Image: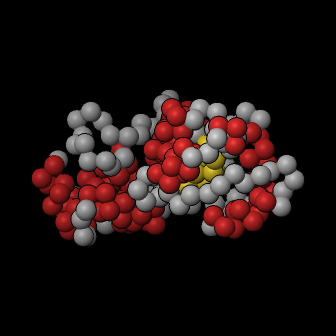
């Protein structure tokens, strides 16, 4: 995916690819070795990455490199990635199936200081405004310091109650694939083997 994006953007006039990294930690390491004058204006950030996910990277960029405008680029249209990314400082949210011309246009707009949202993100934001509040993301103060996002912890609790992926998806208005990916992320972060161990973990830490 990274190489495809690189080849796509390198042929666009006025756009130069400053570098690429396989996860958030590598991205920060790359920036630390790069002279400030060569820092990028825009960063395309995958939401789900090993070592450091996209929302955390966006937050670090806002703090350590405020002149870089991050855009969350992901296959997921889940609230945690949309609102969590925007709260962390992202200047946009786009799905990976965004047509190339729209992606290039979005990069140029973000470089000019605009904020860009794909159709799915716009619909979620409009729905949240209509309901009177943007959904909260991230763990609440009484949740264990386990490194899970608010949505991941919510899904872990549902797994602990015996809910299937289909039931989780229906209850949270997400796809089964998104639910499965969140569960995989929970298992990875907690060092667990399967959803049975996750259910046991929930029972112990509820």
- The residue located at (25%, 70%) in the rendering is 194
Taking depth in this image into account, of 79 and 103 the one nearest to the observer is 103
Asked whether, in this view, residue 162 is left or right of residue 63, the answer is left
Q: Quadrant of residue 61?
A: top right
In the picture, measured across the screen, residue 51 lies left or right of residue 66, that is left
53 relative to 164, above or below:
above
Q: Is residue 132 visible?
A: yes
Residue 82 visible? The answer is: no
In the image, residue 195 above or below residue 116: below
- Residue 21 rendering spot, x and y as whole percentages: 56, 58
Between 112 and 144, the residue placed more toward the observer is: 112
At horizontal 51% and vertical 47% (from top left) the residue drawn is 28
Identify which residue, 199 or 12, lies in the foreground.
12
Colour scheme in use: secondary structure
Identify which residue is drawn at 36% across, 65% down: 184
Q: Nearer the viewer, residue 33 or 180?
A: 33
Residue farthest toward the top in the current orientation of the protein: 132
Q: Residue furthest right?
A: 13
Q: Is residue 35 left or right of residue 176?
A: right
The total of numbered circles placed on residues is 0
- Residue at image point 71% right, 62% down: 6
Report x, y in % for residue 22: 53, 61
Where residue 59 sits in the image (x, y, percent)?
Answer: 49, 38
Q: Quadrant of the N terminus?
A: bottom right
């Amino acid at each position: 995916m990274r190489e495809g994006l690189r080849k796509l953007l390198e042929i666009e006039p006025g756009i130069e690819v400053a570098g690429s990294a396989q996860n958030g930690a590598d991205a920060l390491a790359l920036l630390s070795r790069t002279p400030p004058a060569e820092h990028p204006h825009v960063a395309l950030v995958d939401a789900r990455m090993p070592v450091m996910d996209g929302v955390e990277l966006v937050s670090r960029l806002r703090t350590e490199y405020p002149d870089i405008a991050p855009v969350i680029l992901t296959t997921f249209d889940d609230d945690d990635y949309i609102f969590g990314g925007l709260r962390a400082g992202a200047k946009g949210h786009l799905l990976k199936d965004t047509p190339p011309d729209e992606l290039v246009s979005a990069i140029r707009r973000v470089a000019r200081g605009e904020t860009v949202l794909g159709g799915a993100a716009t619909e979620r934001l409009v729905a949240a405004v209509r309901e009177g509040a943007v959904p909260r993301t991230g763990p609440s103060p009484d949740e264990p310091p386990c490194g899970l996002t608010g949505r991941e912890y919510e899904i872990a609790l549902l797994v602990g109650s015996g809910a299937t992926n289909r039931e989780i998806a229906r209850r949270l208005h997400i796809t089964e694939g998104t639910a499965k990916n969140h569960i995989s992320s929970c298992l990875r972060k907690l060092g667990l083997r399967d959803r049975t161990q996750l259910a046991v973990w929930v029972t112990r830490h509820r």
